[in-house]
Amino acid sequence: MFSIRQGSNTLIIVLHEIYGLNRHMEHVCKQWHDSGTDVICLNLLNREPFEADKEQEAYQYFMQNVGFERPVDEVLKVVSSMRHDYNRICLVGYSVGATIAWRCSARGNIDRVIAYYGSRIRDYLDSVPLCPSLLIYGQQESLFDVPTLLDKLQQHPTVQVYAPEGSHGFANPHAVTYNRRSAELAWEQSERFMNQGQIG
């Protein structure tokens, strides 16, 4: 687990991509810390991160050893254990982490969710977020049609969507699909969304 605390009344739990708790996730944690929140990133892989060029190996490891069931329970246990320390607990997930955040949002006890390019959310459209949720996708995805998915997601009253130019992984500066301008715009949207309804 990667943790940065400063006594904030808001905790952000970052949920990583298939690669694990890598440099990109540490950068995300530092960004949120610099914006004034406490941050932790759980190591859902329970191992060292995969390098960016090991996508297939990382994906197989995640599907065989982690999946989308156990992490939901793990995240919700952490949320429950820290609830008395914070006014707000929010999830920020990327790719598989975004899908895990989406599934957690339907179980309650979470104040806000931001989910970056959670492609597997399309398999859990029956999950209804109980908290405000911002879903961010690049305009191009190889496995599904983004506008069609966004139309379905926007039917949930708690969901906002944002789709800048780019494809899966556009916010990761270490990925070949990195789009700096779209990453900056998505960060601005995320920060604005997180600050809505801020207490104290």
Image (cartoon, rainbow, N blue to C red):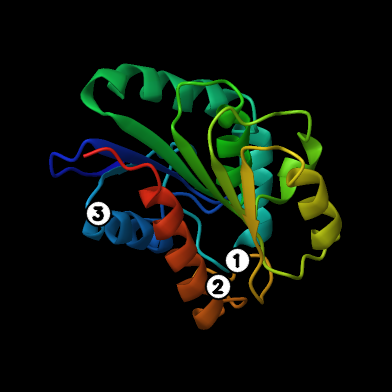
User: Label 3 neighbourhood size at 10 Å, few (<14), some (14-19), many (20+)?
Assistant: many
Label 2 neighbour load within 10 Å: few <14, some 14-19, many 20+: some
Q: Nearer the viewer, residue 124 or 108?
A: 108
Do labels 1 and 3 touch, CB within 8 Å?
no
Quadrant where the C terminus sits is top left
The answer to whether residue 144 is visible is: no
Pointer 2 and pointer 1: residues touching (CB < 8 Å)? yes
The three-letter amino acid code for the residue at tag 2 is Ala
> In this rendering, would 66 be left or right of 88?
right
Q: Give, as a three-letter code, the residue at label 3.
A: His
User: Residue 169, image x and y in percent?
Assistant: 60, 66
**Which of marks 3 and 2 precedes in the sequence?**
3
The percent coordinates of residue 112 (x first, y second) are 47, 38
Q: CA distance from mark 2 to mark 1?
A: 6 Å
For disc 1, the marked residue is: 169
Name the residue rendered at 61%, 26% in the picture. 106
Q: Earlier in the sequence, mark 2 or mark 1?
A: 1
Left or right of residue 79, residue 159 in this image: right
- 167 is higher (above) or lower (below) than 145: below
Q: Earlier in the sequence, mark 1 or mark 3?
A: 3
Horizontal and vertical percent position of residue 45: 49, 39
What residue is drawn where x is 41% and y is 38%? 90
Find numbered disc 2 in the image and state the secondary structure of the residue it sits on.
loop
Between the residue at mark 2 and the residue at mark 3, the CA separation in whole angstroms equals 23 Å
Q: Which mark is residue 175?
A: 2
> Of all residues shown, which one is farthest toward the left?
7
Image x and y of residue 12, in percent: 35, 42
Amino acid type at mark 1: Gly
Secondary structure under tag 3 reads helix
